[in-house]
Amino acid sequence: MQEFASYLHLEELGGLELLKAQYHHKQFSKHVHEGYCIGVIEEGAQSFFRTGQLHTAPKGDIILVNADEIHTGSSAVESGWKYRAIYPTPEMLLDVGQDFFTHKNSVPWFPSAVVHDVGLAQQLSLLFDLLEQKDNTLLKESMYLSTLAYLIQRHGRAKVTPIQHSEIHHKIHIIKDLMCQKPEHDYSLTELANYINVSPWHFLREFKKHTGLPPHSWLVQLRLQKARQLLKQGWSIAATAHACGFSDQSHFNRHFKKAMGTTPTQYMQNF
């Protein structure tokens, strides 16, 4: 099986990304996306880690990963797997979710990583076919919103953030915000630990406990998120790598392909 991955950027849907990919030996390490991953397995089967356990999605099943949720990806069978997926942001799903949840400003949360829903899978496939075509903006918007609404209604829950947090949870949140505001900065473990007045070892342990990744891996994900934004704005790959804190372009390319399954150049081909 020949491996490939191509991204389609749909400006008429607020910059929504559509991925069409086929993998055989590719293995995605733990990573996160700022948006949800909503996909359908078209050939083979995929194995991936999510919500603390390993899941398998065979042909015809739907894969669901929530925004900022740690996950992996690899083949579950010798022949590999082929799939298409969209990556709507929480903001994109917020308006749709208001019609189904009683809590205001609740973004959807999908408890199941793999869903067997033949009708919905067929509707998603039809949506993906439509999104790959030119023009028909009104039809695309209508199909996109109705499909998301159907998905949320059948398989979504309201994600309600608890009001009370432990002190260390609050401190980790402060560090996450700090790194998010300036991901290109070369932070040190001591610097981050001192910022919230804890020991470096305690910070390292608690950060991984609360996020699922060590601080340096989380920072790489934030840098990649910023990189995708800059690439979409027309920045060159070299300038993007420098602006996002990567030591050089090859370092940037390696991390980008490891997380996205494609190089920055390939990622921008259909933009």
Image (spheres, helix red, strand yellow):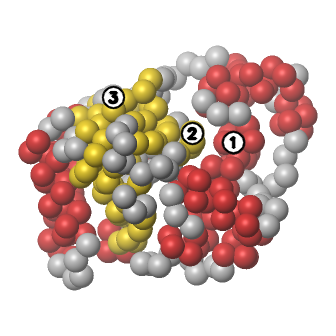
Task: Please name whichever residue, 208 or 107, is drawn nearer the observer in this view of the structure.
Answer: 208
The N terminus sits in image quarter = bottom left
Q: Are marks 1 and 2 in contact (CB under 8 Å)?
A: yes
Asked where in the image residue 61 lies, by quadrant, the reply is top left
On screen, 68 above or below 103? below
Q: How many marks?
A: 3
125 relative position to 209: left or right: left
Q: Position of residue 200 (x, y in %)?
A: 86, 26
Q: Which residue is mark 1?
A: 217
Q: Which residue is mark 2?
A: 30
**The residue under label 3 is which amino acid type?**
Pro
Determine crowd level at label 2: few under 14, some 14-19, many 20+ residues with C-alpha closer than 10 A. many
User: Which disc, if any, is residue 111?
Assistant: 3
On screen, 235 above or below 38? below
206 relative position to 122: left or right: right
**The residue under label 2 is which amino acid type?**
Lys
Mark 1 lies on a secondary structure that is: helix
- The residue sitting at 58% across, 81% down in the picture is 234
Q: Position of residue 212 (x, y in %)?
A: 60, 30
The answer to whether one can see residue 106 in this image is no
- The residue sitting at 18% across, 57% down in the picture is 125
Q: Nearer the viewer, mark 3 or mark 1?
A: 1
Gap in angstroms between the C-alphas marked 2 and 3: 19 Å
Determine crowd level at label 1: few under 14, some 14-19, many 20+ residues with C-alpha closer than 10 A. some
- The residue sitting at 73% across, 37% down in the picture is 215
Dot placed on the residue nearer the N-terminal end, 1 or 2: 2
